[in-house]
Image: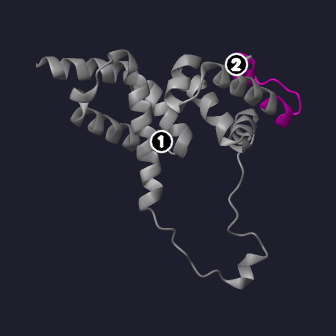
Amino acid sequence: MSAKQSQFDALVRATSGDLYRYGYWLCRDGALAQDLVQETYLRAWRALDDLRDTKAAKAWLITILRREHARLYERRRPETEAVDESYADTGANAVPEASGEDAAVRAAIGALDRKYREPLLLQVLGGFSCEEIANELGLTPAAVMTQLFRARQKLKARLGGQSPGVIHELS
């Protein structure tokens, strides 16, 4: 086994769980998240020689995954269907909403402005430090800390002052 392949295998073992969790959060589909992670590793393999700092590998892979997810929507063209007027008023095609604390937290995080949501997700799902998030998003560590604090406060407000597990762990 070559040194490059050994390095890559170690990278995959160390980051696959975090990449899957982040990919799943982005698309909310297990199979699609696996595809995103696989495509991320394929692109990473092709560009492994460009990776200069192995300590930054996780941030590099998260960036690739985020860009792969964005590419999905660049390529996708929404399909349109004719809707039968008789069903429009009955709500027969309505999608049932998820229930429970997890669904409430997910909805509250999804409703946050992107500038608050991204650092929060990178910290919670990716396990990144404030400094790593700052490097990833092109911000100062102080700005990231402020955005994380405000994100937590907005989540608490949206959830009626309750502090579910995810928010409690972040505080």
Relative placement, left or right, of 2 versus 117 is left
- Which one is earlier in the sequence, the residue at label 1 or at label 2? 1
**Pointer 2 local density, CA inside 10 Å: few below 14, some 14–19, many at least 20:** few
The residue mark sitting in front, 1 or 2, is: 2
Residue 129 in view here: no
Residue 105 in view here: yes
Q: Which mark is residue 73?
A: none
Residue at 66% x, 37% y: name it. 115
Alpha carbon distance from label 1 to label 2: 25 Å
Q: In this view, does 77 lie above or below 108?
A: below
Q: What residue type is disc 2 on?
A: Leu
Label 1 sits on a secondary structure element that is helix
Q: Where is residue 131 in the image (x, y as percent from the top left)?
A: 55, 17
Q: Quadrant of residue 105?
A: top right
Q: Does the magenta stretch include residue 43?
A: no
Classify the position of the N terminus by image quarter.
top left
The magenta stretch is 155-169
Q: In this view, does 81 lie above or below 42?
A: below
Label 2 sits on a secondary structure element that is helix
- Work out which residue is located at the far left of the displayed protein and give it: 1
Residue at 40% x, 45% y: name it. 68
**Pointer 1 local density, CA inside 10 Å: few below 14, some 14–19, many at least 20:** some
Classify the position of the C terminus by image quarter.
top right
Q: Is residue 54 above or below residue 98?
A: above
Q: What residue type is disc 1 on?
A: Gly
Q: In which quarter of the image is residue 92?
A: bottom right
Residue underneath mark 2: 170
Q: Does the magenta stretch include residue 160?
A: yes
Residue underneath mark 1: 30
Q: Position of residue 109 (x, y in %)?
A: 70, 37
Q: Where is residue 27 in the image (x, y as percent from the top left)?
A: 53, 45
Q: In which quarter of the image is residue 112?
A: top right
